[in-house]
Amino acid sequence: MTDQASPGPDPASRPARHFPRWIWLVYIVLFGGSVPWYWPADAPLQLWFGLPHWVVVSLGATFGVAVFTAFVVHRMWPEQEPDE
């Protein structure tokens, strides 16, 4: 009797465990847009829908993150195969 470790499943048959790079790029852009660091501190205050403009942009970017996450989960998430 020999002590051999079983080779395990074929790595080529397993799904990729990462998402494409463009998904991460979209997340970086959306999260970057949700933080108003890019507006000058001395910029005049503008009101959009009764809120400061930076709040509306931040909320819009946050909504974009939520919608994009739903898209990624729905379209790109690997399907789990039932155990038989």
Image (spheres, rainbow, N blue to C red):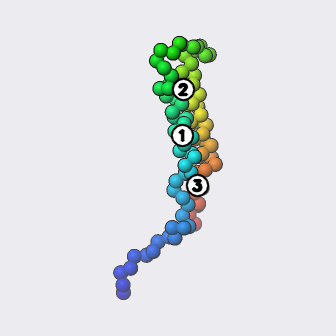
Q: Is residue 9 above or below residue 67?
A: below
Name the image quarter holding the C terminus. bottom right
- Residue 56 drawn at (x, y percent): 57, 22
- Residue 74 drawn at (x, y percent): 62, 46
- Residue 53 drawn at (x, y percent): 56, 18
Q: What element carries label 3?
A: loop
Q: Is mark 2 on a helix, strand or loop?
A: helix
Who is closer to the viewer here, 80 or 55? 55
Q: Indicate the amino acid at tag 3.
A: Pro
Marker count (numbered):
3
Query: What's the residue at 57%, 30% (across, down)?
Result: 61
Query: What's the residue at 57%, 45% (across, down)?
Result: 23
Residues at discs 2 and 1 in contact (Cβ within 8 Å)? no
Residue 15 found in image quarter = bottom right
Q: Indicate the amino acid at tag 1.
A: Tyr
Question: Neighbour class for label 2 at 10 Å: few (<14), some, many (≥20)?
Answer: some
Q: What element carries label 1?
A: helix
Q: Which of labels 2 and 3 is toward the front?
A: 2
Q: Which of labels 3 and 1 is toward the front?
A: 1
Distance (Cα) linking label 2 and label 3? 30 Å
Q: In this view, does 72 lie above or below 47?
A: below
> Which mark is on residue 27?
1
4 displayed left or right of 8: left
Name the image quarter holding the N terminus. bottom left
Query: Which of pointers 3 and 1 lies earlier in the amino acid sequence?
Result: 1
Query: Which of pointers 2 and 1 lies earlier in the amino acid sequence?
Result: 1
The residue identified by callout 2 is 58
